Image (cartoon, coloured by chain):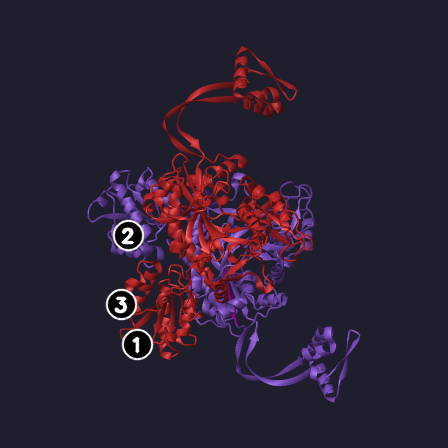
Chain colours: A red, B purple
Amino acid sequence: KITKWMPKEESIDRLKMEDLLKRRFFYDQSFSIYGGVNGLYDYGPMGCAIKANVLAEWRRHFILEEQMLEVDCSMLTPEIVLKASGHVDRFADFMVKDVKTGECFRADHLIEAQLERLLKAKDINPEKKAEIERLLPQIDNMKGPDMQKVIEQYKMKSPVTNNDLSEPVTFNLMFATSIGPTGQVKGFLRPETAQGIFVNFKRLLEFNQGRLPFAAAQIGNSFRNEISPRSGLIRVREFTMAEIEHFVDPTDKSHPKFETVADLQIQLYSASNQMSGESAQVVRLGDAVNSKLINNETLGYFIGRIYQFMTKVGVDKRKLRFRQHMSNEMAHYACDCWDAECKTSYGWVECVGCADRSCYDLTQHMKFSGERLVAERPLPAPKKVQVNEVQAYANVIGKSFGKDTATITKHLQQLSHDDARALHDKLEQGDEKINIDGKEFAITRKMFTFRSIEKTVQVEEFVPSVIEPSFGIGRIMYAMWEHNFRIRPEDEQRTYFTLPPLITPYKCVILPLSGNEEFKPYVKQISAILIQAGISHKIDTSSGTIGRRYSRSDEIAVPFAITIDFDTLKQPYSVTLRERDTFKQIRVKIDEIATILQGLSTGTVTWGELCTQYPEFVEQQTTKEQQ
Amino acid sequence: KITKWMPKEESIDRLKMEDLLKRRFFYDQSFSIYGGVNGLYDYGPMGCAIKANVLAEWRRHFILEEQMLEVDCSMLTPEIVLKASGHVDRFADFMVKDVKTGECFRADHLIEAQLERLLKAKDINPEKKAEIERLLPQIDNMKGPDMQKVIEQYKMKSPVTNNDLSEPVTFNLMFATSIGPTGQVKGFLRPETAQGIFVNFKRLLEFNQGRLPFAAAQIGNSFRNEISPRSGLIRVREFTMAEIEHFVDPTDKSHPKFETVADLQIQLYSASNQMSGESAQVVRLGDAVNSKLINNETLGYFIGRIYQFMTKVGVDKRKLRFRQHMSNEMAHYACDCWDAECKTSYGWVECVGCADRSCYDLTQHMKFSGERLVAERPLPAPKKVQVNEVQAYANVIGKSFGKDTATITKHLQQLSHDDARALHDKLEQGDEKINIDGKEFAITRKMFTFRSIEKTVQVEEFVPSVIEPSFGIGRIMYAMWEHNFRIRPEDEQRTYFTLPPLITPYKCVILPLSGNEEFKPYVKQISAILIQAGISHKIDTSSGTIGRRYSRSDEIAVPFAITIDFDTLKQPYSVTLRERDTFKQIRVKIDEIATILQGLSTGTVTWGELCTQYPEFVEQQTTKEQQ
C-alpha cells in the first residue's frame, strides 16, 4: 500500500536518479527491444549484485541468527491451496474499462488521481474541497457500488481518451495457468511465498522435533497481475519476497531475546495517531510493548529486528516508520499489524509487513485438506478424559453379509456416541436389526462393541499462532537507492550512491594512475589477491583522467578505490585507498589490502578507524577533477 | 536428456536414500497435504541450505572469478520473445492419450518402456530382439508418424488400463498465461533463463564498454509443463537453472586462461565413440582441443571449469563424463555441444549442457525485434567504402505538395541506388515528373539530392557467437546426493552423506555430552562465537546417547561435531572436534574453533592437515555406539 497525500518535505531528483540507475544498468524495463511489458523489470549487473547482497544479509540477520528453517517451495500452486488461503475469492482489485477502447484502469487509483486533481484546481469552492478531503481517505475501503457513486457524481472519464468508463468490476490479481497436459489441473502463480510454508507445517514441526516456537523462512518470487502498473519498481507484476512465519503458542507470545531490542528508539505511527491526525512518534520499543501499543513481545521483537535490518542495508532511519493498521484495514483474523514504510518520492511506501495473523492460515488449510495442523503442549497436570471406542468386526460381518460388509462396517463406525451406546446395550439382549438405505441387516454381539474408557493424557493439542514479517525486496532496494542518492555540491553532473559497503555491488575498484605499462602487473596481482579473498571488485584501465574514473565508480556506489601510482612500484609496495563519500585517501601496503577490505565490507572495521591508523595520503597537485 | 540402457555397474539403494532425504526434509513433494502435484517439489531446510551453498559456490567459481555480468530477469515472458527463440513453434514433446480415460503419456517414454519390457521377455526370438535393439536408439529422433508406426506394429496399449492409445500429437511444454487485465497480452513462464540475457545484449555490451568477449550469467527458475513426470527430482516442472552466455567474436574463439585447465584429465564420450559403440575415454583437455575433438578453446575452457565446479561440490569424478551431441541430435545452428552427465541410478543424467550456439539467438532476436544486436571489431586497416547519401528536402517539397509531402519524401528516400542516381542526373537537366500510386508530382532540383561519397571506416559490425554453459541445479544436487550416500559397514541402519563441508547445510553440530547443567553456558558461548563468524551450525541438546546424536547429525551430512565434555569445564577450555567420515577426533581450544571451522568450510585447511597439528582425542571407553 502506498500512502500518498503525505507531505513531501525533502525532494529528490527522481528523474536524475532513474537516469543513472538505467544508464549504469542497475535495472531497466524487461523485453524493451520488443516494446517492454508494464510492471516487469530486469536487474542488470549492479542491481543483481545489490539484490544478492541484501538477500545474503537477510539470511545472516534472520535465518542464521535465529536458526530459522529455510524452505524453497514451488511457485506453481494448485487452485485448492489458494482457495483455502482465500486468494481465489478475495485477492482482487476493482477495475474500470474505457467503454470504447477497452483500456483498463485500477478503479481506486483512477478515482484518487482525479479527486486529487480536482483538489488542486484554483477555483474549487470550500464545500467541494471539504467533501473531497473527506472522500480521499475512504477510497481504500470502498467496494464497487461506492466507487461507482463517486465516478458518477464527479462524472469521471478515461484519463487517456475522455471516453465513458464501465462500472467497477473485480479483477483477481493472480496469474492463472494449467498444470499438466490434460488442462484439468488449474493452477496459479503464487501471489506470496507464505502458503508454501503453511502447507509444509507438519514436516517443519517434525524437523524441529515437535517443539514450538520456531520460525520458517522463504525467499522467492511471487506474481501479481496488477491492472495497470505505473509506479516503476514500486508496483510490479513479478517480485522477490522474503517471508518469515514464526509459529508460536497463542497463550505465550513472550520472546526470550526481546530485551536485546527493547532500547531501540523507533518511529511508530499508531492507529490512534492516524485517527487523531497526529504524526508518527519516536517510541522506545520496550515501552511500546509494555503499554500494549504493540500487541506482544514476539511482534515487538520482529519490529526491532526489521528496524535493525533496514538501517543496516542503507535505509535512512529518519525515513523509516512503522505504521499500525487501523481496525478497518486489518484482516478480520489478524490481531495486530505494523507496516515498515519508507519515505520516497512516491510517498510513504510499505516495504515490510509485520502481522500477527493468529491461527487463521493453519486453520484454513486444516479445513480444506483434512490434515491436523496442530502442535502439542504439555498440560500443567495430567488430565483424565473419557474416550469412546467403537469397534465393528469386519471379518465377522463379512461371514454373514458378503459384499455389504463395507457398507455395514462404515455405518456402525459412524454411529454417534449415543446411538452406539444404545445399540451396544440392545445387543447385550440379543440380535438387533438395523436399516441401511432401506435394507435390513441383523447385527449380532460378535459384530460390534462399544466402550467408553477413561484415559490419562499429558498433552493437549492446539493450533499455533503465526507472526509474519514479509519483506518486499524490490521496494526495499528502491528505498535504499532514493535514500542514498547524492549530487556533489560542486558539480551537479556528479551523482553517486552512499550505500554501505556491505551492500555495494563492488567493494572496490582498481585504478592504475595511467596506461603506463609498469602498472599492469600490479593490477593483475591485486585483482588475484581480491579474488582469492572473495572480494568483488572492478578494474578500470580505461583511458580518461583519474578523476573521471573515480566519478564513474562513485556512480555505481563503489565505496573504495585502490589507485596504483609510481610509489606502488617501489618498496614497500603500497597503494592509495580512497573513500567514496569523503574523498579522503590513505596509503596502505599491498599485502594488507585484502584484510582491510574484508573488514570494511563486513563492517568489522570502519573507515574512520582506519584513518586513525594509516597515514593520510595527500597528492601534491590535488585539483578538484582529480579527487 | 536421460540416457538409459547404460550398464549399471554399482547399485545404490535409492529407496533407502530417498527415505532419508524425505525423513530429514531435504526435499519432498509439494502440496502433499492436498495430494501433491506431479513434478513439483519443495526443498526443506536441508535441501534449501545445500542449494544456497551450491549457488554461492557457483557465483564464486564462475561470476566472481571471470568477472561475469549477472542479471536477474523476468520469468513472465511475452509470446513474441519465445516466437523469436523458437520455443513457441518447437518446444514440444509427442504425447499419446488413453482413448477412454484421457490419461496422457509422453510417447517416447512409453514406447521405450514397452520395447525394453519386450526385450526382457524370456521367449523373445533373435530377429525380434535385433529389431528392438535397432529401434531403441532411434526413438529420440522419431516424429509422430514414426512413433505411430511402432505403436501399431507392437500393438501398444495404455500401461495403466490397457486401453487403446490415440495417435501421437505434439504438446508444447510451456506454461501459458495472460499478462494484464485485458487478456490481450499472451505470455509464458520462461522455459530457460537464457532469453533474458539475449534480449538485454545491447545493455550488457554497453555496460562492458563495447568490448568482447564478455559473459553474462543468470540464476533463476524455469518452467516446463512435462507431460507425465515420474523420475523424482530428475524430471520436474519447475526448476532452478544457472546459465552463462559467453559472447565472443566468431573469428577468434581462443581463451586467454585455457592453459589453466589444459592439463585436466576428463572423461569424454565423443560422437564418434558413441557411433562406434566404444565407451568414454579419459583425455587431457588440452589434447582434446588441439586435436579439434572439442571445437574451440573457449568451449574447452568452460568444459574444464564445469569439471572443476562439479567435483568441488561433491560430484564423483568417476561418475562424471562429458558426452558430445551427435550431429542428428544437435540443433542445426550449433557448431558443437557437450553435456556433462552424471551417472545415477536413473542412468547417465544430463546435468549441464555446454554448447557453442554460434550466432543463432542474437540473429533471431534481431529479426523479430528489428534492433541491431551486434558488436564492432577494429578493422586490420582502415577501409574506404562508398556511402550513398539521399536527401529529400521535406520543407521544399511541402511548399509545393502540402499533405502529400510525407508520401513523396518517403518515396524519394527509398529509391534504389541506381534509381536515385538516375533521378539526380535527370534533375540536373530540369524538373522531372514522378508517379506515386497513380498520382504525378513534378520534382525540382531543390527537392532532392543524391551523392555517392567515399568514407574511411575503422571498424566493422558483426553478430557475436555465444557459448552457453547451462546448469540444472536440481539435477546436480540429486547426483551429489547419490554420489555421497553411504551406509556404515557395521550397521546398515546408519546412513550418511559424505558431502564436502563447503556444501553441507551445517558446518558443525554442538553436542553437550549429557544434559548436565554445567555444559549449558558452553553451548551458548560456542554458538555465539559461530554466529559471529557466520558459521551455520546446529545445536543438539536432545536426550539420547552421544552416539545416537552423532548418527542423527551424520544423516544430514554435518561434517564436524563439537562435543562439550567434563574437560571443557577446565582450563584451557577445550572441546573435541569429530569428523563425520573417519570418526576421528581431535582436541582443540574453544577460542580456536571459529578459525578452524572457517578454514575447513572454505577448504583453506583440510581435516588431514589438522590431524597432524592437533592431538588426537581418544575416549577412555570408546564403544562402537559412542563413535
- Name, please, the residue furthest toward the left: B571
Residue where numbered disc 1 is placed: A567
Image coords of residue A55 (percent x, y) = 43, 54
* Relative depth, front residue between A442 and A357: A357
Q: For residue B458, which quarter of the picture?
A: bottom right
Disc 2 residue type (three-letter)? Ile
Residue at 56%, 75% in the rendered image: B461
Region rendered in magenta: B243-248
Image coords of residue B566 (percent x, y) = 23, 42
Disc 3 residue type (three-letter)? Tyr
Indicate whether A260 appears above or below A453: below
Where, quadrant-wise, is the C terminus of chain B in this rendering?
top left
Residue where numbered disc 3 is placed: A614
Q: CA distance from mark 2 to mark 3?
A: 31 Å
* Relative depth, front residue between B411 and B480: B411
Can you tell which mark lies on residue B593?
2
- The reply to whether the magenta stretch includes residue B314 is no
Q: For residue B317, which quarter of the picture?
A: bottom left
Q: Is residue B434 visible?
A: yes
Have a look at marks 1 and 3 and say if they share a chain: yes
Type of secondary structure dominating the magenta stretch: strand
Q: N-terminal of the two: label 1 or label 3?
A: 1
- The reply to whether the magenta stretch includes residue B245 is yes
Have a look at marks 1 and 2 and say if they share a chain: no
Disc 1 residue type (three-letter)? Asp
Q: CA distance from mark 1 to mark 2?
A: 40 Å
Q: Are marks 2 and 3 in contact (CB under 8 Å)?
A: no
- Name, please, the residue furthest toward the right: B438
Q: Are marks 1 and 2 in contact (CB under 8 Å)?
A: no
